[in-house]
Amino acid sequence: MHNNYFEQVFVDHQPPPHSDKKAKYTAKCEIMPLQNMRLAVKDLFHVKGIPTAAGNPDWLRTHALPSDTNSTVVSLIKHGAAYEGKTLSDELAYSLNGQNIHYPTLINPINPERLPGGSSSGSAVAVAVKLADIGLGTDTGGSIRVPASYNGLFGLRTSHGLIATDNMVSLAPSFDTVGWMCRNINDLEKVAQVLLPKESANPTTHRTVKLCIATNLISCSEQASQIEQMVKGIESATALTLVQDNIDTNTCKISETFRTLQGFEIWQQHGEWISRTHPTFADDIQQRFDWCKNITLQDYNIAKQQQQSFTKYINSHLQKHDVILLPTTPGRAPLLNTAANQLGEYRNNLMTFTAIAGLAGLPQIHLPLFTINKAPCGISLIAPKNQDLRLINIAKKLMKHLL
């Protein structure tokens, strides 16, 4: 089975070039924090001398070999991670499905009847089938959180700007973040300790952790009853204080606002290349690019005002609470045979959940706590910006109580 998955998820299996012989020698002689952990790298990150296809053959054809390696990849290898190869991405990372018309269909290893989720699809599947221990990816609109949810993994979307996005293919720069997926939270934390600044572990000023339970979002999720049962089980925890509240996603139309801002930036980023090259995209992705080029500056400015209002609103919640607890996705991954129009509607609904952290640049961690008829789903915790390590610590505290 693993050989079959290997052909699906990896687009290359070459060791990255190493120019620092001293670092190689040191890595062999010392116990490194990520030693014996295998690294799968989403095919948006540049690795010197290895092509970056960004999930599209026309992109591969029209771009030169990278002359430098992304700094996150360098850091992970420097700290002992073993590079296994670059993994399949949805086209230019502009999808959350985990399907790519140019490559073999990715199979969700937990529930093959359902989508694997994207755009960090290959990295997620590689970790889920134990071909890798670290699935490095990016998250612009949900591309770590969604495949983590669909494949039963822990996943961290980092605060916007906390980790450099150098030497990689961008989608929408003011939303692009680096993230990763692991099968357990301890491995996820090991990576975080390497990549994240120590100040992102700032302790709370009070002993108990205050959780804002996003009641309205939970109630409209498929896993609502399981989350509600979980909440009842942790109400007696002395280290956790729970406050039931609604998160207003309607006033600022956050799904529409996010998609407009993202789409405008995407066209600024890739419009010239698309117009000049006429690349072949999947129909749904082509339709989204066609929509992007018609977003006006007025549309953008209105959405920008909505973003600022929502960011102020959500930050006010996080001044009163340490984290917000919500469903990561509306539920299980959609079935593979879901009609295109239904997937479009689902995407818009899904982004109501993912746009909260996206619009405000906040860190979010997915916890794979539930299954429904053998298909994974779970919850997320969102923390204030640049408190990523603290977010992981709170997640571990919650997990410890649940176990």
Image (cartoon, rainbow, N blue to C red):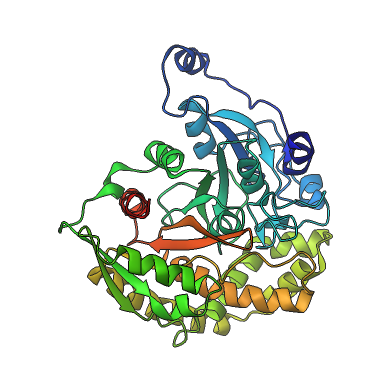
Please state the horizontal and vertical placement of residue 289, each as a whole percent of the image.
72, 70
Please state the horizontal and vertical placement of residue 330, each as a whole percent of the image.
56, 72
**203 and 187: which is toward the camera:** 187
Q: What quarter of the picture does the N terminus occupy?
A: top right
Q: Quadrant location of residue 386? A: bottom left
Up-down: is 208 above or below 164? below
Up-down: is 211 above or below 296? above
Please state the horizontal and vertical placement of residue 96, each as a whole percent of the image.
65, 63
Is residue 330 something one can see in this rendering? yes
Up-down: is 305 above or below 149? below
Decide if residue 57 is on the left or right side of residue 367: right
Residue occupying the point 41% across, 19% down: 31
Residue occupying the point 48% across, 73% down: 225
Decide if residue 167 is on the left or right side of residue 393: right
Is residue 261 something one can see in this rendering? no
Instruction: Please count the marks in the image.
Output: 0
